[in-house]
Image: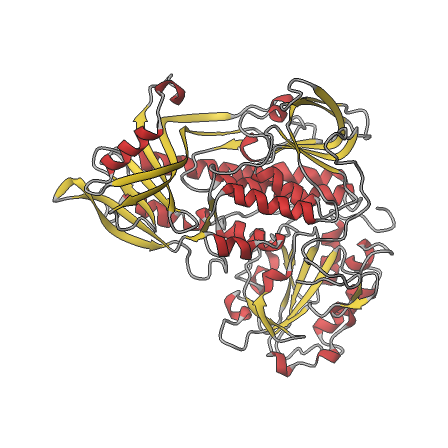
Amino acid sequence: MQFYVDGFRGGDPDIKTAAPCRRDRGPFAPLPEKVDVLIAGCGPAGLCLAAQLSQFPEIDTMIVESKPGPIEKGQADGVNTRTMEMFQAFGFAETVKRESYWVNQTAFWTPNPENPAHIRRIGRVQDVADDSSEMPHTLINQARVHELFLDVMKNSASRLEPDYGWAVRDLTIDTTTDDHPVTVTLENTGVNAGATKTVRANYVVGCDGARSNVRKAIGGTLHGDAAHQAWGVMDILANTDFPDVRQKCLITSAHEGNVLILPREGGYLFRMYVELDKLNEDERVSSRNFTAEHMIVAANRIMQPYTIDVKEVVWWSIYEIGHRMTDKFDDVPEGEAETRFPRVFTAGDACHTHSPKAGQGMNVSMQDTFNLGWKLAHVLQGRSEPHLLHSYSAERWAEAKRLVDTDHEWARIMSAPPGESELDGSDMPRFQKQFIENLEFTGGLAVQYHQSALVGAPAHQGLATGEEIGRRFHSAPVVRLSDAKQMQLGHAAEADGRWRIYAFAGKDDSSDRGSKIHTLADWLESDPASPVVKFTRADEDIDAVIDLRAVFQQTFDQLAYEDMPSLLKPRTGKLGLQDHSKIFCVDHKGAGDIFDMRGIDRDRGCMIVVRPDQYIAHVLPLEAREYLSDFFERFLLPANQS
């Protein structure tokens, strides 16, 4: 963590120096007339976007929520490894790791052939495959995740806080103007219930759930189907003789249905998903009047011979499995993308819904807005043309489709009666087989964006076989040269909207003058064709847009820090202080060699270009300077034009 760049100050380093206040946030202050971005909904998607945009105080962001304040319990709880990597960029992954339950093993229970009315354990699977991520799969109350995002917002220079008690009723878009063309009608849901207020925005993002008024206002409709199967979920404090209650468990009975157990943070709390009754074709789950007691009774039937003695039901809900998504995630009609760019977006449940059992809802929702946030910032800062925003729906729709299809298959297999699934009859139970096959997906690691203006061609993929273009940057151990600190290379990146170039040195390159690393750094720093020179404004730090980091094959004691190029030791901030955090070398204490672990060509080295949302945009040879410049010209505006 770096601070003091603009001068010494005491206190909590997470609390940034406040920027000049744009609006009065007093208890009786009016809402603003205009904003750059209006976010509807303080769920995971909305708060992730707000936290990212709060890092840019020049962007006027507003987030509204119909509830009177933050949620306190219930709802989603699973945080996959990919999301934990994102939390690291926001600065609170270590807090989540300390407070959460870590899912290390998943146990599988099926009917005992000798007594089918009773269940028995038939196997366990390591939940996070070795070296799939440096992060664990964790379980923690969604309300705590919200609180951590709210802290990021509140501590940012923007001092961003939600406006509770307001919901989007409707909106209209004036396509004839670029001056805050979206007019939003907000309705008060608090003490002045029913009162309305109009706010004009440049962009609106609907994170307002499956019944989203933002989606309805732009003509979006959720399409899909329902499995007509009722499930219950409850967070409970209970005693039980079931031996695996502190492990994630998938349990299937002979005739009574299925249970999923998820231990929770704190050592005592756990969550149970309990299969209830099949619904008729035209029946809704609300008509059955299920209660928490129905779930408890069903769980005890399914888990025989074990029993659960519930002491407290902390939270519970009944739901019907459904898999639905919209045709696109923005307001631009089909066929008009060439003449019109998006002004209104939807994210999370507002544009895709599915069952909660795969643990992907909160995770995918946050990844939606992590994808969108930096793109909105680029456009609002004048770094990119607005057509960049078309890439949000294009990239995230494909991933939502993958989620819905995979979850649909998972729900179908989980709910099929014994003997009626194509996976029945093998040596391994069907749900264990499906679980193992989906480990990469459930970890959030299967996402791959296709070739586009933001994702390069794989012509040089062989230079880094373990860092696949379009997938997230896979971190690995390194040692920081300046202070010999062991760390993860991916943890050098923050959620600050910057691009990263990781330059991996070839064999024997120690950055002497004339070496490929030194030549690349000098070119990036001073050549008119360099993307750093082209796209960085005169009043900005040299790494404000593109942040170069270098990784060498030698150990820290074999390199001369004083010989490193100046771009790798830039002077930044108001005081022009030297940054010592940009040069790395291989780990010398046995944690692993990043060149071997990620398939980096030792002879040639390479450049790996990483987007602000941590996805790999390109892999290029160190000498491919023209290709690098051409790539950034696809979507960034020259500093003298932006």
Q: Residue furthest bottom?
A: 558
Q: Quadrant of residue 385?
A: top right
* Residue drawn at the location 52% of the way across and 43% of the way down: 363
Q: Position of residue 43 (x, y in %)?
A: 57, 36
Residue at position x 40%, y 21% in the image:
286
- Which corner quadrant holds the N terminus? bottom right
With 573 as the anchor, is 72 left or right in this view? Answer: left
* Residue 173 image-quadrant placement: top right
Tell me where residue 427 appears, x and y as whole percent: 23, 49
Vertical arrangement, residue 40 with respect to residue 14, above or below: above
Give the color scheme: rainbow, by chain, secondary structure or one colour.
secondary structure
Number of dots carrying numbers: 0
**Residue 50 at x, y percent in the picture:** 66, 41
Q: Please report the residue visible at 68 percent of the width from the left and 65 percent of the height from the top.
A: 549
Please report the residue visible at 75 percent of the width from the left and 23 percent of the height from the top.
Answer: 198
Among all residues in the image, which is located at the extreme left? 114
Question: Which one is in front, 331 or 242?
Answer: 242
Viewer-nearest residue: 489 or 430: 489
Is there any visible trace of residue 215 in the rendered image?
yes
Relative to 65, is 511 above or below?
below
Locate residue 276 relative to residue 535 in the image: left or right: left
In the depicted view, which residue is nearer to us: 630 or 277? 277
- Percent x, y for residue 613? 63, 50
Please tell me which residue lies in front, 265 or 442: 265
Report whether residue 512 is seen. no
Would residue 127 be found to the left or right of residue 301 on screen? right
